[in-house]
Amino acid sequence: MRHRLAPLVLALGVLSLAGCGFFKPTAPERPQAGGGAQLTPDYTEPSNALETLLKAMNLKNQANGADAWVGAFASPDRDGLTTLFGFDPIVLAAKGGQDPGWDLVRERKFYTDMSAIATQAYFMTWELYVEGGDDIVDAAADTAHLERRYKIYLVDAENNVVGSPIAIGIAKLSFKKTSPARWAIFRWMDFVDPTADPKDPSQVSFSTRRLDSSQ
Amino acid sequence: MSRLCRLALLLLPAALEAVLAVPPGHAQQGTESVRFAFADTTLLRDTLNLHFDRLFPLADSLMITPDSLRAQAIRFRLPLSRLVFLADSLHMPVDSVGSVMERERFNALALSRKHLAKFGYTSGYTVSGGTSIWTNNTDYNLRTGPFFLRNATSISLSRAGGGQLLSLNQDRSSTTEASWEVVRNLSLGARVDLQRNAAFSEPASIYDYSRKNDQYQMSVRARPRLAKSLTTELTFYGGPYTEPYDTYQKKGLNGVMNARVRYALGAGLYEDLSVQNTDKLGQATYFGHGSFTTHDFTRDVRSSLSVLEAQPASLRVDLAWRRDQAEKPDILVESSSQTISDTLVTVSDTSVFRRRDPSGSRSAQVQLRLRRDQDRYVIVSGQLAETDRLLSDSRNGLFVVNPTSTTTKGVDANARYALLGCLVEGHFTYSLPTTDMPRRDVARGTGLSDTTVDFREEQQSRARTVEFTLTRMLFRRVTIRATGHVSLTTLRNAVTDSSYRALAGGRRVQGTFDRDDYEQGYRISGTYMPMEKFNTTLSLDVSRRSQLVLPAAGSSSSNEVRSYRGEWSWSFRMMKGLTVTQLNQLGADYTDMLFSTDDALLLSYLTQTNLNAVLTPRLSMQVSQRSTVSPNGDFTTLPDGTVVFSPASERREYVLSASLSYMPAPVLTLSVLPYYSAMNSDVTSGSVAVPSQRQRSLTLGGGASLNLPVTAKGRLTGDIRRNFQAQRNLTYLSGVLQPSPRSERDYWDGSMQLTWEF
């Protein structure tokens, strides 16, 4: 009889342990109005939107960095558009070939995960992707197409770049002017940068980082 | 302390005492347990003439996952029974058996004195998209009397890219080892290891290189038999070494000494002690900047003590201690401004210094196992571990040493108990890692520019998890399983120094936000098997996950996700050689942003059907269809305070794939693999759904697999497939189609190996 009661006694013991606050999370404080070193998002031009993305990444999930990053992308309720995120086909095939159906909830998590890759400060850059041709801005249709090479470096105390980039890739970006002061990205087609060192495991594109984030 | 806490402290010892009162041990009963009613039976499929009949009970007994055990058996081509027997007889974890057996093949003392001459040649060609790899390997073994000679040569040439970008990698290596057993259980030997590695690209890249690395070593191996219950192995090898790098080179002498002592006192006590000592004395040269001496070393001691391993009550104590150090040259570039000819210029002064990165670790683990049989046991273990590491870092024109240390304490318990037809399993873990580490962040504040500063931060994590599973056969054909879990991980961070504030004008850095991650959930599944050829399972999965950022500066991202999943699956063998399986799933994820109104809902409906048909002994076919519909939207608060759901978008995906295989002869299999996918995405504008995206993709692959004997000693194996892929992505702007071309891709994919043995 003693053995038969044992699991019951054990279960009661653990349940009572759970009841004494061992598994109770702490309530977060209310967000401070304009708390932290806030970034002022600027999406008034495609180039300004890229600058805002850059600053948001460098902010590393502090203050309103995540909101500024995600806010650059078109959302149905704000812009009447859904952002399409495309992945490099070779990366996608290597990760199982299944497009996870990227949305802004996943993009926010990707931003958070990306910010946690290293403890050092980040330095993100946009470079002209010459092979992609000139920027195309169609004023009549309020659309723009920009192709850029992005890189994210770690930087030391003197703002010197340390080591190779922790993310590198080609972004083919389509913008739509959805209000007088807002250009929203509605398409981010991501590709592996051929100049990235394939032997360096950290030199991967956002395609890889995004798909890793969705695991 | 609350009443519940006091009750828990009283009840836990009582429960442990009751469960741990173990009767005398007896042989494990062979009855099948209900715990395998939900197992993935696809793992039981025969592969490479290996059978996996008792995979689940064996994996359960060895406490590894069934797929890991299966992978070990396939990797080393060992039947499960042989793998388990070797693990028992060698006193090692089952996942170490294969690698130890491979290593022992090259131990002269481990081989018999029978004459042996064996030559093997393997050539392989692999192509995938724009990448091709050609490999050639030879392996020669000669044993005659006390002499042993082995040579392994490998050449790998790879080519990637095409058109304007091309990348070539060439790796060549040859290892020759000769040894002579001068007296019984003592051998002397020599080893030559030649390596050439090169990488080229067109156009030329800064990553191109060409390296040469030759190693010459002598070796001494001994296995003195000091006592019947004592097994001793001593190994020494050493010689000159060269380590070429892009910017510097190290040369010198190295020596490695390994000792392993195993002591068995009957079946009750088993001790395994291993010591490894590595030293490298040499000279490092930073090209163009002089040289200095270096000393690299590794000291590693591991002990594993098992007491009464096969008895109902057993104890295992594992201890490990390690220290290592590596030295290498590094450069420090210091820039200063000077006025030369009335012009301000920046002058860089480069100096070379010795960079030393030592690290160490210590760990202890005690495991107490009380086991009546495979359905009744308790395992309690405690761990204590420390690691420390020193890393050099450039800071303000100086190299400073940054210590990082982690201390981990933890306890976990696993229990299983069969009672009145129920199988109850419990799992509890509590780990307390604390890390003291250097951090770099930006000090921000009004009136001053941002300043990047270095400081130290202590991160304390507390992770606790409890999980219970109850499995019971309700009736003869119905089995239910209920699982519940709760977990909480807290992360608390503290900036532990303030010296950085002098550089930051008195400002403080933010530090890492404190946060709590909480999850609770349960899953109830029931499976019904009215006949051998039909079974069906119904499941309900409910969970709640909270990600809470605690300080006000970051708490705006705190959120809680409540997930609900309902699942129904069935499998029916309609006739001999024709089986249909189907999965239907409904899901809903409610995201609640705790401090904003950006709440969201994601719904999903999934149906997946698989048809598996063996039409004739030579012809088989698998057809799979999957459709997913995922609408999502936001919650909006109306002026009167009513919260309504507003659809935002809907995504519909369809996949149809098939695999048709025909085996005209035992050596050849032909296959066709069509794959079609379609995705439609609509957004809601106003209250009207308008198209936003359309994707269509078709892949058609066809190829052959070969397993062809080439004379009596050779074999040609592998597969080759040609793939054609066409894809089009259409995007709509405000419902208006944007022109987009169709992309097509035609490529080969495959791998062939020719193996020859004499």
Image (cartoon, coloured by chain):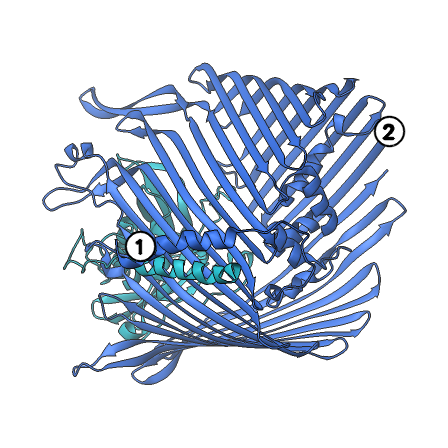
Chain colours: A cyan, B blue
Looking at the image, the residue that sits furthest to the bottom is B688
**Badge 1 is on which residue?**
B6
Is any atom of residue A127 visible in this view?
A: no
Amino acid carrying label 1: it is Arg
Indicate left or right for B236 with B384 as reference. Answer: right
Q: Tag on residue B207?
A: none
Q: Nearer the viewer, residue B21 or A51?
A: B21
Mark 1 or mark 2: which is in front? 1
**Based on the displayed image, in which of its 4 quarters is residue A139 positioned?**
bottom left
Q: Is residue B755 above or below residue A186?
A: above
Q: Residues within 10 Å of mark 1 (few under 14, many from 20)?
A: few
Report crowding for label 2: few under 14, some 14 to 19, many 20 or more residues within 10 A (C-alpha).
Answer: few
- Rendered residue at 63%/26% (across/down): B261
| Picture residue at 43% right of the left edge, 51% below the top | B429
In primary-sequence order, the first of circles 1 and 2 is 1
Q: Is residue B97 above or below residue B362?
A: below
Amino acid type of the residue tagged 2 in the rendering: Lys
Residue B23 is situated, as x and y percent measured from the top left of the image, at 59, 51
